[in-house]
Amino acid sequence: MLLKELDLNKLHVFAAVAEHGGVSRAAAELGRTPSAVSQSLSALEDALGVKLFDRIGKRLVLTRGGQLLHAHVRQHHAALQRTVDTLRNDAGDVRGAVRVGVYLGFPRLRLVTFLTRFRARHPNVELRIVYAPQEDLSARLLRGRLDFAFALRPRTDTHAALTSTQLFEETLLLVSSRRFFRRGFTLEALARSPVVDYYQSGPLIERWLAHHYGARAPRPTVAIWAATTDLVLDLVLTHAGVGVLPRTVATPYLRRRRLVAHRTPRPALTDWIWLNEVRGAYRDRALTTFRDAVMRELA
């Protein structure tokens, strides 16, 4: 059937039932009777020729077809809402929502400073922050669940629908508490020391060793896979092991002599931070303003 033959109001009713998990609450939100909502759902299922809900106890649970329809209805509803918001507010203050994904190791202080400044300038913009692994952030961008993602890698090599903009460079330091390497830092001592790292899929300590020592790098002993920068920092501070941290995260503790950075004659290992987004995606005024602020303050 053609979309023009479908009653779009029934899609609105369907979305409300899906989000509330039942007819009664959806009816209350829509200002309709439960019987009218039930009739609308039945008519939609008949028109599509697909069962959209299974009844489990007192709840209506989406079928596989219902999940697919709901995901697309939500995306289109959000896009229409952003368009309406833009048309209503172009002449006034910047309003709307910005959904931002952040990889788990992003420099926290830098993010807090940026978000605080942005909100001070644009108090009517709602910021929704999601922390997740990088692959998850890319998937959320592609499904329309995020507007932007701060990432460690550009995604244009693996996801043609995404575009990546280089923002800033982050220096990575091997650090420990003073309990380690009391006789001086050596490769042999490092090989005997427990390491706190992030992900088994891409150990950062191995990158640091390969960068500084090449073929001479020993195989490290990773004791804890901690995932986030904050947890790695806390574990290193409490003597659980040595770890690689961004300079911006480690610097306050280096100054207070709670941590020691172990350097080599080679230049420091660095990572570039990127802004990933969907290529050619619609941008309302709030999203455009946020992106401009990122380019101005972080790039």
Image (spheres, rainbow, N blue to C red):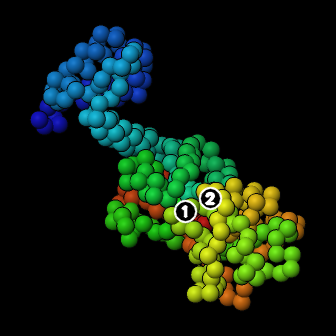
Mark 2–mark 1 distance (CA, rounded to whole Å): 7 Å
Residue 67 lies, with reference to residue 137, above or below; the image says above
Amino acid on which the number 2 mark rests in the picture: Trp
User: Within the image, what quadrant is residue 225 found in?
Assistant: bottom right
Vertical comparison of 27 with 90: above or below? above
Circle 1 is placed at which residue position?
A: 200
Residue count near mark 2 (Cα–Cα under 10 Å), binned few <14, some 14–19, many ≥20: some
What residue is at 24 percent from the left and 15 percent from the top?
39
Dots 2 and 1: beta carbons under 8 Å?
yes
Q: Which residue is mark 2?
A: 225
Q: What residue is shown at x 29% (from left), y 39% (from top)? A: 68
Q: Position of residue 229 (x, y in %)?
A: 66, 59
The secondary element bearing badge 1 is classed as loop
Q: Is residue 150 shown left or right of residue 135? A: right
First in residue order: circle 2 vs circle 1? 1
Residue at the (76%, 82%) spot, across then down: 186
Q: Percent from the top left, x then y, of residue 24? A: 39, 13
Name the amino acid type tagged 1: Gln
User: In terms of depth relative to the viewer, which is nearer, 127 or 131?
Assistant: 131
Task: Report x, y in % for residue 252.
Answer: 81, 65
Residue 290 in view (yes/no): no
Task: State the image quarter where residue 195 is shown.
Answer: bottom right
Horizontal relation, residue 115 to residue 164: left or right: right
Q: Does 220 sit above or below residue 133?
A: below
- Local packing at callout 1 (Cα closer than 10 Å; few below 14, some 14-19, many 20+) is few
The answer to which quarter of the image holds residue 296 is: bottom right
Residue 82: percent from left, percent from top: 42, 43
Give the farthest residue toward the bottom. 265
Looking at the image, residue 105 sits to the left or right of residue 138; the answer is right
Query: Where, quadrant-wise, is the C terminus in this rendering?
Result: bottom right
